Image (cartoon, grey):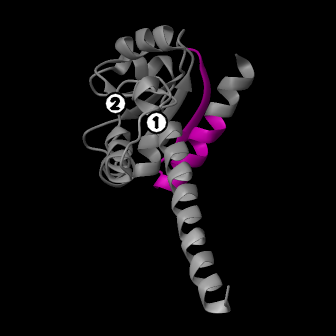
Amino acid sequence: MNTRNFIKRASALGTIGAIVLGGLIIGTAVFMVIGTGGAGAIPTTALSAPVAPEVTAQTAVVAAPTSIDWQPSFEAALAQSRASGKPVMVDFKAKWCGPCRMMDEQTYPNAKVIAASQDFVMVKVDVDERPDLEQRYSIRSLPTMEWMRADGKPFASAVGGLPPDALLYAMRVANNRAQKSS
């Protein structure tokens, strides 16, 4: 076999190997994203059949949350926390609060914040509509984020209009505290 034929065959085998390896990596990544048993997960029997990478990639993108799932009330959030075992993140706010609006417009739509919110039951409480909760939790500045257990007992808090990176840090700290205390 001459050098030219050897190089052609080696290139062809290298290309086939790269395609197979790429398919394995994509398949593994998609299983990690959507094969966890949650809503919209692909049944494990479907994972054994060959799937075109284009379809798989689209399915993985669709499975990612695009917004935070806010609970309709403080009481609903506590009930959801009891049912799910997740801690609650309460955003104490008011309609007239500028930093609160900034978080609604810039922080909460952030993709990383949306992803991190999946670890919590999320709820917004307007202190003008719920002065009882403002008093119970001694809210003195807005916005105030309180992380609490299903019984309503807080274990972490953050105060002020936080940009995405600062809120993500506070969420990680709160999540670590919740895991250590459970």
Residue denoted by label 1? 117
Residue visible at 47% across and 23% down in the picture: 37
Residue 141 visible in this rendered orientation of the protein = no
Q: Are marks 1 and 2 in contact (CB under 8 Å)?
A: yes
Which secondary structure, mark 1?
helix
Q: Earlier in the sequence, mark 1 or mark 2?
A: 2
Q: Position of residue 8 (x, y in %)?
A: 57, 82
Residue under circle 2? 69
* Location of residue 2 (image quadrant): bottom right
Residue type, numbered disc 1: Ser
| Residue 67 x/y as whole percent | 32, 40
List x then y, in percent, for residue 52: 35, 49
Q: Is residue 164 magenta?
A: yes
Instruction: Give the secondary structure at mark 2.
Output: loop
Region of the chain picked out in magenta, as a range: 153-174
> Tag 2: Cα neighbours inside 10 Å, few (<14), some, or many (≥20)?
some
- Residue 139 versus residue 149 in the image, above or below: below
Is 90 or 35 nearer to us in this picture? Answer: 35
Residue 57, magenta (yes or no): no
Which residue is nearer to you in this view: 19 or 133? 19
Left or right: residue 101 compared with residue 17: left
Q: How many marks?
A: 2
Q: Report crowding for label 1: few under 14, some 14 to 19, many 20 or more residues within 10 A (C-alpha).
A: many
Q: Quadrant of residue 12?
A: bottom right
Q: Quadrant of residue 135?
A: top left
